[in-house]
Image: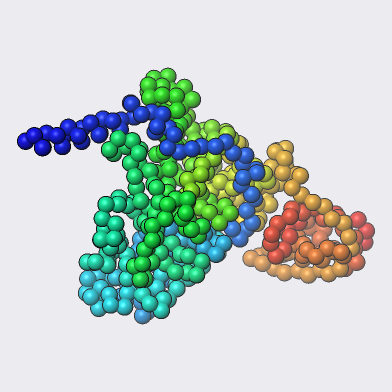
């Protein structure tokens, strides 16, 4: 009874010692937050780097791909957990297979899972990678091949966060298993101090402290943990009682988050609003999910769900539904990028909504066209997008036309310029009268694309 009483007392004291009431400053300091400059930190993305799929759409495409593979679909199904990573400079969602049932596991476990899949979030292409040696270690395996049991034998006293699947630059699948430590009392101040990387094929493992984790790893800190730590920072920085009474300078994240790819790292994005829960943001945060580096940007504007409603209002006659936004730098202004999906969860259109003025909305079936319309709206509203354009004058050395999806486009080459300029006839009807040898003035926006879209064209000399 004495021993039992000592144990209970120890647990109670350990629990009380971790209360926020006594440790507000320690909870607030778990996540170091810096002030950031949005235009400087978040470079404008090119079309090839803007992810357009959420996890639901990715799952739809992956299941369709598996259905085309007769030798696999009869024995395996796709694991319903996807990890968004940067793989060879591309934003992708990756997952593995699982056995269809216990009998199929018995028949196939000796050779392992024969493949994994990844979905390119820009092109929406699904790639199934067949392995020479199958994957033997997963969270869905049985007996000693089950990942958590494998880890427990190797690291008997370590507490692990939920593992995620990632790929190194050679395409080898690894389970990234973050290790947990509690920094306040017995159970308070949950944080990550490192990760064990487990080769999904061989089971070989190695522990890394956070500062030593290889750069190809993208997901060490879970989004919900980062959200929790920022909410503690935002509400407890001025003390525990201020978080309840008065609530001076108290702020929390909005209801939702998304991911951004910046410099080959994955960042968790979330808006920040006041604790009163109004329908506007006072800023937003970007958290590096490998290093936990966090920056806060003081930019006020509409919260994400208001922007989603604004985008849906543009296409209400079509009944498309908005996905949770990405935050992009378009025209050197913070912009919500939203994919619009039909009832079959397929992306049909795209929308761009200005964060500061969410009534400024552009939508189109094509990202390039959507951006063009959006930049024109920014210029029309004097938001400063005009300085992103360049002008070139010269003689037309070549001109071609093509009809794409019912629209006529003209492609021009200008003497002394290596770009191929593209003009939509509906936007500049006079282009149909152009001939080789005419001198023109072209206004365009620099972009890393095969063709440079023209914003305005003027004939100077026929």
* Residue nearest the observer in this picture, 292 or 318: 292
**Most distant residue in the top direction:** 246
Residue 235 appears left or right of 284: left
The quadrant of the rendering that contains the C terminus is bottom right
Asked whether residue 67 appears in the rendered view, the answer is no
Asked whether residue 177 appears in the rendered view, the answer is yes
Which quadrant holds residue 239? top left
Residue, x 26% and y 58% (percent of image)? 152
Residue 211 appears left or right of 459: left
Residue, x 73% and y 60% (percent of image)? 452
Residue, x 23% and y 75% (percent of image)? 106
Name above or below for residue 401 compared with residue 313. Answer: below
Which color scheme does this rendered protein use?
A: rainbow
**Most distant residue in the left direction:** 1
Q: Position of residue 122 (x, y in %)?
A: 55, 61
* Residue nearest the observer in this picture, 58 or 251: 251
Residue 409 appears left or right of 53: right
Q: Position of residue 242 (x, y in %)?
A: 41, 22
Q: Position of residue 51 (x, y in %)?
A: 54, 56
Name above or below for residue 233 compared with residue 110. Answer: above
* Residue nearest the observer in this picture, 3 or 227: 3
Which quadrant holds residue 139? bottom left
Which quadrant holds residue 202? bottom left
Residue 106 appears left or right of 204: left
* Residue nearest the observer in this picture, 6 or 31: 6
Exactly how many numbered labels are in the figure?
Answer: 0
Q: Position of residue 243 (x, y in %)?
A: 40, 25
The quadrant of the rendering that contains the N terminus is top left
Residue, x 69% and y 42% (percent of image)? 378
């Amino acid at each position: 009874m004495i021993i039992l009483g000592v144990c209970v007392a120890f647990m109670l004291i350990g629990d009380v010692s971790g209360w926020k009431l006594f440790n507000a400053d320690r909870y607030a300091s778990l996540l170091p937050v810096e002030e950031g400059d949005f235009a400087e930190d978040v470079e404008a993305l090119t079309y090839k780097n803007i992810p357009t799929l959420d996890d639901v759409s990715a799952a739809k495409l992956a299941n369709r791909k598996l259905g085309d593979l007769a030798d696999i679909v009869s024995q395996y199904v796709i694991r319903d957990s996807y990890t968004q990573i940067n793989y060879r400079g591309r934003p992708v969602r990756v997952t593995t297979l699982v056995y269809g049932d216990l009998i199929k596991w018995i028949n196939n476990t000796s050779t392992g899972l024969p493949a994994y899949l990844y979905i390119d979030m820009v092109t929406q292409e699904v790639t199934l990678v067949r392995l020479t040696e199958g994957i033997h270690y997963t969270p869905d395996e049985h007996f000693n091949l089950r990942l958590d049991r494998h880890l427990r034998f190797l690291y008997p006293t370590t507490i692990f966060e939920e593992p995620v699947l990632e790929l190194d630059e050679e395409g080898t699948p690894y389970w990234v298993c973050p290790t947990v430590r509690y920094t306040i009392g017995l159970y308070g101040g949950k944080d990550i101090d490192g990760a064990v990387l487990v080769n999904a094929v061989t089971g070989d493992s190695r522990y890394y402290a956070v500062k030593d984790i290889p750069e190809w790893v993208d997901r060490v800190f879970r989004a919900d943990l980062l959200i929790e730590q920022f909410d503690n920072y935002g509400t407890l920085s001025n003390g525990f009682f201020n978080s309840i009474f008065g609530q001076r300078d108290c702020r929390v994240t909005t209801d939702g988050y998304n991911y951004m790819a910046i410099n080959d790292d994955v960042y968790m994005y979330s808006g920040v609003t006041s604790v009163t829960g109004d329908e506007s943001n006072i800023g937003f945060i970007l958290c590096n999910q490998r290093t936990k580096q966090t920056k806060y940007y003081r930019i006020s504007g509409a919260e994400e769900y208001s922007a989603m409603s604004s985008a849906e209002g543009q296409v209400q006659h079509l009944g498309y539904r908005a996905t949770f936004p990405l935050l992009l730098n378009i025209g050197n202004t913070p912009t919500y990028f939203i994919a619009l999906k039909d009832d079959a969860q397929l992306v049909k259109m795209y929308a761009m909504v200005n964060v500061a003025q969410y009534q400024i909305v552009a939508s189109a079936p094509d990202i390039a066209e959507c951006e063009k319309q959006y930049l024109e709206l920014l210029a029309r509203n004097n938001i400063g997008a005009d300085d992103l354009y360049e002008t070139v004058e010269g003689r037309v050395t070549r001109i071609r036309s093509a009809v794409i999806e019912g629209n006529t486009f003209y492609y021009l080459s200008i003497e002394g310029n290596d770009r191929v300029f593209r003009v939509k006839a509906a936007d500049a009807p006079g282009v149909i009268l152009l001939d080789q040898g005419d001198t023109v003035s072209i206004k365009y926006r620099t972009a890393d694309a095969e063709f440079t879209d023209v914003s305005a064209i003027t004939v100077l000399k026929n």
